Image (cartoon, helix red, strand yellow):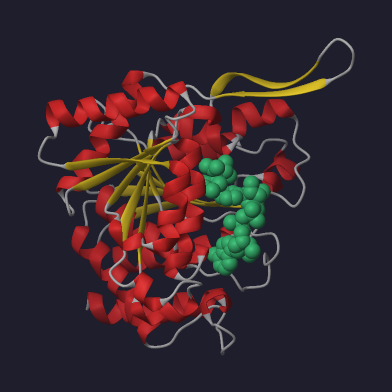
Amino acid sequence: SDNRSVAIVGGDGIGPEVTAEGRRVLALVAEKRSLPMKLVDGDYGVEAYEKRGRMWPEPTRVAMAEADAVLFGAIGGPAQPLPPEMHRTDSLLAVRRSLDVFVNLRPIKTAPALYEASSLKPRVLKGVDLIIVRELLGGIYFGEPRGVETLPGGERRGVNTHIYTSSQIQRIARFAFDIARTRKGRVCSVAKENVMEAGQLWREEVQAVHDNQYPDVELTHMLVDNCAMQLVRAPAQFDVLLTDNLFGDILSDSAAMVTGSLGMLPSASLGAVRADGRRGALYEPVHGSAPDIAGKGLANPIGSILSVAMMLRFSLGMPEEADLVERAVSDALEAGARTIDIAVGRTYVSTREMGDAVASELTSLLN
Ligand code: NAD
Ligand code: IPM
Ligand code: MN
C-alpha cells in the first residue's frame, strides 16, 4: 500500500538521542515527497522494564509487528538488573528472532573528510567500500544448551553452544552472493574451520552454494583471526564479507574504525519475504547504548541516519531518497560538521546540531 508505517524505538542510553535524529530525517523525506507515513513510537529496554515491568512492552511489540520497518536505537543499562527469564523473552536477540531477521548488513565505506578521524593511515583507507553480511539468528548466540551450572563438588561451569545447520548457512550464503552481484562480485567467507566442526560445515556449504548457483561470483575463504588482521592492514581488499553471528559482531566493531568512529555505522537486519510480500526489517546503528556519553548530547547520530537510508532502500521502495540521505551526510561532513567522536580535538557540535546539519543539506537535495 501507499501508506507506510515505521515503528520508532529509541531504547536505552544514547539510543533515544540518536534515533530522534534518524526519525527527523525520515519525517523530512516523507514530508518533502508528500508520502503518507505513520511513525509509531514505542519504548523498549531497561527503562521500560523499570517503568512497566517489561523490557519489551506489549504496545511496542504490536507496533513492531504491524510496521513495514523498525528504526531501533540501542539496548543496555548501566548495570543489568534483569531476571534471566526477561532476557529470554524480551532481549534484543528475542526481538530479532521474533522478527525472523536472519541477515544483518553492515556497510563500511570511508570518506576522505574523515580520514583524519580514523586510527589508520590515509593510504590504508583509500577506496574502502565493503559490506559485512552477518548471520543473525544462529551460532553461539542461540545454541542450546546454554547457562551456568554448579557441578557436584561446587565447581561452576558456564556453557554456550555454537551450532549451525546447513539450511541456515545456505540462506545467508545466497544473500551474500546476491549482494555481491550488485557490487564488485567478490565474497570472502570467514570462519574458524581449522578448530570448529561447525566452521568446516560453514565452509563446505558456502562453497557448495557458490559452485551450484553462483559460479560467476568470486569466492575466497579466510580464517577469522587472519581477517581481523587484514581488516586493519588492508581493508580495501574486501567487497562482501560473509560470516557468522559472533564473528560478524566482533569484526564489524573493529572495521568501524576505518570510517573514523563506531558512531558512523548503520545496519539493516532483514528476514525472508513472506507470502504476503512483507518481511521483517529492523534498522539500527551498529553501536550500543554508550552509557559513558549518554544524556550529554555528545553522541554521533550518523549511524542512525544512515540506517534510515538503508530503510528507504530496502523497506520503503525509495532508493533515490536513500542515496540523497547518504549524500546529505557526506555534504554535512565535507562542510565541517563534527560530533566529538570524529572531531580530532577540534570544535564539535551536539547530536542535535549534527542532525540539523544533515537535515539542512537534505532539504536542499530534496527540493
Ligand atoms: P557501545 O557501542 O555502547 O560503546 C563503545 C564505545 O563507543 C563507547 O566509548 C561509546 O561512547 C562509543 N560510542 C558508541 N556509539 C557512539 C556514538 N553514536 N557516538 C559517539 N561515540 C559512540 O559499546 P559498550 O560500551 O561495550 O556497550 C554498552 C551497552 O550497550 C552494553 O549494555 C551492551 O550490551 C550494549 N550494546 C547494545 C547494542 C545494540 O543495542 N545493538 C550494541 C552494542 C552494545
Ligand atoms: C550488536 C550488539 C548486539 C549483538 C548485542 C547488544 C546483543 O553488540 O548489535 O552488534 O551482539 O548482536
Ligand atoms: Mn556489537
Q: Nearer the viewer, residue 225 or 319?
A: 225
Q: Residue at x 13, y 25 (%)?
A: 212
In percent of width and height, residue 355 lies at: 46, 74
Front-most of residues 3 and 74: 74
Q: Is residue 305 above or below residue 361?
A: above
Q: Residue furthest right?
A: 153
Toward the left, the furthest residue is: 216
* Nearer to us in this view, 248 or 71: 248
Q: Is residue 7 visible?
A: no
Q: Is residue 246 left or right of residue 67?
A: right
Q: On the image, which quarter does residue 13 sit in? A: bottom right
Q: Nearer the viewer, residue 120 or 288?
A: 120
Q: Quadrant of the N terminus?
A: top left
Q: State the residue at coordinates (38%, 88%).
A: 335
Q: Where on the picture, by quarter, is residue 259?
A: bottom left
- Residue at image position (38%, 33%) is 102
Q: Is residue 174 left or right of residue 87?
A: left
Q: State left or right for residue 8 relative to residue 15.
A: left
Q: Residue at x 43, y 87 (%)?
A: 336
The quarter of the rendered structure image containing the C terminus is: bottom left
Q: Quadrant of residue 333?
A: bottom left
Q: Is residue 117 left or right of residue 131?
A: right
Q: Position of residue 320 (x, y in %)?
A: 19, 63
Would residue 101 be visible to someone looking at this image? Answer: yes
Q: Number of callouts in the render? A: 0
Residue 272, horizontal then vertical, whole percent: 29, 31
Give the farthest residue toward the top. 152
45 over 342 or under it: above or below? above
Could you say where residue 100 lies in the image, as x and y percent from the top left? 40, 30
